[in-house]
Image (cartoon, rainbow, N blue to C red):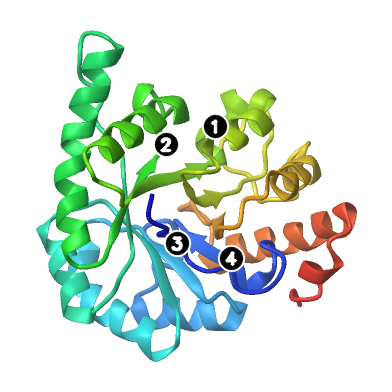
Amino acid sequence: MESHVPAVKGGSIFAKPNLLAWCIVPFDAKNRGPKERVEMLVKLGIGRVAYDWRDNHVPTWDEEMSLYKKHGIELSGFWGFDDKALDLMKRHGIKTQFWVMMGSGGADQKAKVEAAARGVEGMAKKAKEIGCSVCLYNHGGWAGEPENQIEVIEQLKARGVTNVGICYNLHHAHHRMKDFAALLEKMKPYLWCLNINGMKEGTKIVPFGQGSDDAEILRTIQKSGYRGPIGILGHRAEVDAEVALQQNLDGLKTMLEKVGDAEARKTYR
């Protein structure tokens, strides 16, 4: 399978240059525009972003992409997939991952996999024409389970479609944390982005470092050999996105001390 994983920047995958910001556009109490959002990322020292959006953000797409380029911010992922998004990437010469949820229709497992593969195949072929890829996003249900995503990817590989991987989100995976190490080992050949979250029972979104087992999560990722980007979340509409990201950075710094990753920790303020 082709590699569509952004290069690791720095020796440790938890080094700050390897982090990307996720869920900071519609989830921001300050409702920043492109200029203010880029200023925030520069201030925080985050050089990668995955862009999530709502319809009201479409008119500012070009401005946002131009400002990313101007300030050296890498667009590592883009939520959803449609012709508008394809045209945007063409205009700006951007090669990125389209983060999508696959379909889940079908009477049994075989039918579900075949239907999901057909749906993803069309997107993947269009994305490949402009040097982009498709990442399957876990958002609950059958379509969000990595084992099913892997079946779909393998079926696509058999058809010669090799630009499809997985973007795994811990905030949608509370029910899988007991077998996280084994699951990560299964996903590793397909995993192109891993978005972390403070894992606390009964609460979906928690700043990293405030969960009960967050140090162990870092150790598990370290041991797995995963070498892709690490995403940190905003995802709280009632919170200033800068505050949300800084809370994650602070929590990561504390957890890195606990797991003995001095190399990564020194990259944080």
Disc on res. 173: 1
Residue 58 position (above or below residue 66)? above
Q: Earlier in the sequence, mark 4 or mark 1?
A: 4
Q: Calculate the distance from the C-alpha at mark 4 to the C-alpha at mark 1.
A: 20 Å
Which residue is nearer to you in this view: 256 or 212? Answer: 256
Q: Is residue 76 left or right of residue 100?
A: right
Q: Which residue bears the numbered disc 4?
A: 19
The residue lying at 21 percent from left, 8 percent from top is 107
Q: Is residue 79 left or right of residue 167?
A: left
Residue extending furthest top? 107
Which residue is nearer to you in this view: 36 or 263? Answer: 263
Q: Earlier in the sequence, mark 3 or mark 4?
A: 4
Of badges 2 and 3, the one in the foreground is 2
Q: Calculate the distance from the C-alpha at mark 2 to the C-alpha at mark 3.
A: 18 Å
Element class at badge 1: loop
Amino acid of disc 4: Leu
Amino acid of disc 2: Asn
Element class at badge 4: strand
Residue 148 position (above or below residue 83)? above
Amino acid of disc 3: Ile
Q: Are marks 4 and 1 in contact (CB under 8 Å)?
A: no
Q: Which residue bears the numbered disc 2?
A: 138
Disc on res. 24: 3
Residue 145 position (above or below residue 98)? above
